[in-house]
Amino acid sequence: MTERLFDFAVGRTNPETVPVARLQRAAHEAIANEYVELTDYHGKLGHPGLRAAMARRESEREGVAVDPDHLSLMNGSMQAVTLVAEALTQPGDAVICEEFTYSGTIAAYRALGIDMVGLPVDTHGMRVDLLEAKLDELGEARKPKFIYALTTYQNPTGINMSVDRRRLLIGIARRHDIPVVEDNCYGDVHFDGDKPPSLYALSDWDGIIYMCSLSKILGPGLRLGYLYAKPPLLDTILARRHDAGGNYLAAAVVAELYKDGVWEITEELNEALKVKKNLAVDGLAEAGSDVCVTSDPPGGLFVWVRFPDDVDQNKLLRLTAERNFRYAAGANFHIHGDPVPYLRLAFGHVPDDVIRDGMPVLAQCLREARTSNEPKSFTSLFH
């Protein structure tokens, strides 16, 4: 008999709610209508129908006009992350980002020899109030080539950057002529409250580079994301692209699926994800309030968990492995790999009953991994 697996390690969407029948119909229509186009190369911007659908997605969410000819389809948003870095940096150059950020971005930047300069994160997102002082500290010789920020449902913390900090970020970056790269791939995985505005909706400055994804609202296996920027910055980035365009068939299918808009399908999927998020947050609050504090994100696919400094993380890894519980260590998301007292739980793909039963397992492992019996000394997620 296979032992039960509690797998909270990797951020994925919910397989239970994939719109299978609608995808099948969309694939049938796309192949019938565009089989000739499948025999061609489609260049650096990609499928015009999907670009139009994504421009509509953006403009309806943000309330500003989005030009589909300034939007380039990507092989997932990670291609955009890498292309931007390749276009704007050389090995040894500095880039400012959150101290905790997406592990894929960290790996890409390390591979490119980028010097990541971190700003702390708190309940209002990146500490943009510290940005000016950091720029002064770096000086003109170490001026960052760009600022990378996960502004909405930040990975790994789930935090939203406040609107005041978004405006401050744009103002400082514009004054210093430093491009801002906004990674918003979780922006439509939304549960509660108002959706915060993207940076490009707050300013017409042409130094903003925006990237988004279909991985989180539909499925990562499609490998579809996009980059949105204004010329000449868009041209500079796309000059680094040499793949003759992305997956036209996948783009055609999704364009057909979303020809009437993304919101009906997206909101259906989000209802199930909100249930999963609440099961994780409420389950840990009930089972582990003595040993951890968690985020309660208004969107995204992750719960960020803080635990006492006296947890032996090697022992925690051993204990959880013995009980078939998988998570992502906080060090994976720290730009310098520091062994911080945090872990990330990805709940999107996990069945509800596994989430419900898994939270007491994690709480007990945290207790057993501690080296003292002292009460936990914190009540908030951040220092």
Image: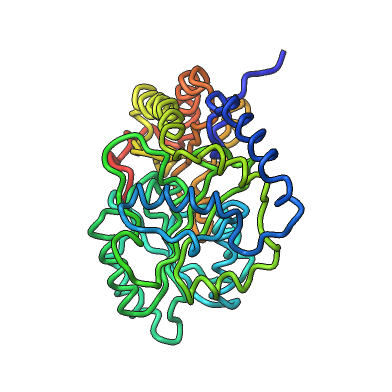
Quarter in which the N terminus is drawn: top right
Placement of 238 over or under 152, stated as above or below:
below
Residue 319 in view in this figure: no
Q: Is residue 259 left or right of residue 137?
A: right
In percent of width and height, residue 295 lies at 35, 38
Q: Quadrant of residue 378?
A: top left
- Tell me which residue sits at (54%, 33%) in the image: 8
- Tell me which residue sits at (59%, 25%) in the image: 21
Return the residue found at the far top. 1
Between 233 and 124, which is closer to the camera in this rendering? 233
| Count of marks overlaid on the render | 0
Return the residue found at the far right. 39
Return the residue found at the far left. 164
Between 9 and 58, which is closer to the camera in this rendering? 58
In percent of width and height, residue 179 lies at 42, 72
Placement of 151 over or under 141, stated as above or below:
above
- Tell me which residue sits at (35%, 56%) in the image: 198
In percent of width and height, residue 199 lies at 34, 60
